[in-house]
Amino acid sequence: MSDLEALKKEAALRAVALVESGMRVGLGTGSTAKYAIEELGRKLSSGELSGIVGVATSEASDALARQVGIPVEPLDPRPLDIAIDGADEIAPNLDLIKGLGGALLREKLTEVQARRFVVIADHTKLVERIGEKSALPIEIARFGFLSTIERLREVLPAGRLRQNGAQPYVTDNGNYIFDAQIPAGQDSDALERTLKGTLGVVDTGLFLGMAERAFVAAPDGVTELT
Ligand code: 5RP
């Protein structure tokens, strides 16, 4: 395991330590969330935890959860006790960019319902301002996507339709993703409002004011941000 993978796992284990028997748990998506799902499965099979139910934020996490023995249920209106997920950027106030893994819509739908949304990451995800390193993934409807992209370019001129080889990348929900650069100085709340009001946009990878805490692993240890 590389040093970075070891850090991701360390952060994931800190978050899973917050899970108690009987909890309904939002299962994130990506290479860091994978360690959390595997650890939950390990704790269930060893008897350290019981009665856990997972709600998966992607088809991939659903499959992994079932593989490691976590019972999975669809999202319903009941609150989740906790959701654990990675992020692409973490600002000092815990605003996030998510969705480089393509699961932003199911992640947002799930994590907004969690009493506690806990982020896990290695230190490379820390930024001073949202959009500093990562593009912002924006999930858009396939129908009329070129028109939607034209509307989006009026707000965020630099961006491109995500590709999967020669074809557009398709999300678990059958939509496309437009990855856009956020200009410096852009207000995240105003941007989110504008994007959500843009016809054809399904949702964005801006997760503002949602995270309760983050475990961020660096070579000198794990920092808990709140
Ligand atoms: C998927 C996500 C992931 O949480 C995000 O991309 C981080 O992934 P990783 O842990 O692999 O760096 O938002 O949609």
Image (spheres, grey):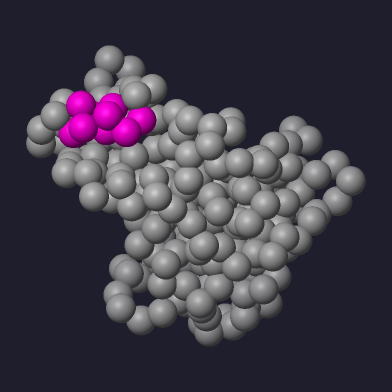
Q: Is residue 58 visible?
A: no
Side of 100 where 223 appears, left or right: right
In magenta, the rendered stretch is 148-156
Task: Determine the residue located farthest toward the left in the rendered image.
Answer: 143
Q: Is residue 215 visible?
A: yes
Q: Is residue 166 above or below residue 172?
A: above
Asked if residue 151 lies in the magenta stretch, the reply is yes
Asked if residue 82 lies in the magenta stretch, the reply is no
The residue drawn where x is 59% and y is 83% is 21
Task: Determine the residue located farthest toward the top in the rendered image.
Answer: 166
Which of the 4 image quarters holds residue 129? top right
Residue 104 position within the rendered picture, expressed as x and y whole percent measured from the top left: 39, 48
The residue drawn where x is 62% and y is 75% is 19
Q: Is residue 199 above or below residue 189?
A: above
The residue drawn where x is 47% and y is 47% is 188
Query: What count of labels does the image hold?
Result: 0
Residue 138 position within the rendered picture, expressed as x and y whole percent measured from the top left: 34, 40
The quarter in which the N terminus is drawn is top right
Task: Determine the residue located farthest toward the right in the rendered image.
Answer: 220
Q: Pick whichever, 153 or 52, lies toward us.
A: 153
Q: Pick whichever, 74 or 168, lies toward us.
A: 168
Q: Main secondary structure of the magenta part?
A: helix
The quarter in which the C terminus is drawn is bottom right
Q: Pick whichever, 60 or 42, lies toward us.
A: 60
Side of 107 where 214 appears, left or right: right
